[in-house]
Amino acid sequence: GAVVSQHPSWVICKSGTSVKIECRSLDFQATTMFWYRQFPKQSLMLMATSNEGSKATYEQGVEKDKFLINHASLTLSTLTVTSAHPEDSSFYICSATTRGQETQYFGPGTRLLVL
Amino acid sequence: GESVGLHLPTLSVQEGDNSIINCAYSNSASDYFIWYKQESGKGPQFIIDIRSNMDKRQGQRVTVLLNKTVKHLSLQIAATQPGDSAVYFCAENGVAGNQFYFGTGTSLTVIP
């Protein structure tokens, strides 16, 4: 149980384009989803927290207009990197929790390369 | 966010030996901690958790120790196996309670 998937696994795009990453909870209702970014050999950095049906709460320093998060259902959250630039290249990981539980279950991550 | 952990250390152990991975956290109000294992190119995998009202919790081959006085966590892996090679992160719950902040991680290499 508690499986989280992400799609796509890899994405390569040209600078200036937008990329959408999906995060799905496969066997539970994810009342809260989290988006992280991880650079090579570094830790996970929390970008934003989203509760189903509400606007995402962004961490300090994360541009909400650049990283659009939608959590429209209890099983799906999307992260759209708008007008991506090479410095946005990173490993993006989502996680999910369900109501009443604190443990976060992570997706396999999406590697984004912006050329 | 809160600061958990310092630089990224590395640890090499012989197969069969015990491993101890350490983590410092900064928020004395944190009351829930998790250890995650991350293999290369994959998302973090839950290993074990502990609440602040405990100082020790055991799982299968793993033990987490919590010292709130010095804000220190450790993960002990018994009889380390090659499959244990990964980066290990500790995470603490944030001020809001449902957010987690990760330490920089420790890279564990098991030598066959």
Image: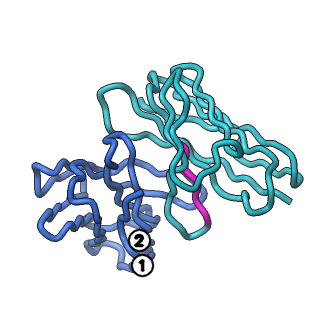
Chain colours: A cyan, B blue
Comes first in the chain, label 2 or label 1: 1
Chain bearing mark 1: B
Residue drawn 56% across the image and 19% down it: A73
Residue A82 percent across, percent down from the top left: 77, 44
**Magenta stretch contains residue A38:** yes
Residue labelled with disc 1 = B9
Circles 2 and 1, Cβ within 8 Å, touching? The answer is yes
Front residue (pair A115, B2): B2
- Number of callouts in the render? 2
A16 w.r.t. A49: above or below: below
Q: Is residue A34 visible?
A: no
Chain bearing mark 2: B
Residue drawn 71% across the image and 39% down it: A80
Q: Is residue A15 left or right of residue A111?
A: right
Residue labelled with disc 2 = B106
B31 w.r.t. A8: above or below: below
Front residue (pair A5, A52): A52
- Image quadrant occupied by the N terminus of chain A: top left
Amino acid type, mark 2: Thr
Name the magenta segment's main secondary structure: strand
Residue B11 percent across, percent down from the top left: 39, 79
Q: CA distance from mark 2 to mark 1?
A: 5 Å
Question: Which class describes the residues within 10 Å of circle 2: few (<14), some (14-19), or many (20+)?
Answer: many
Identify the element where label 1 is drawn.
Answer: loop
A39 w.r.t. A16: above or below: below
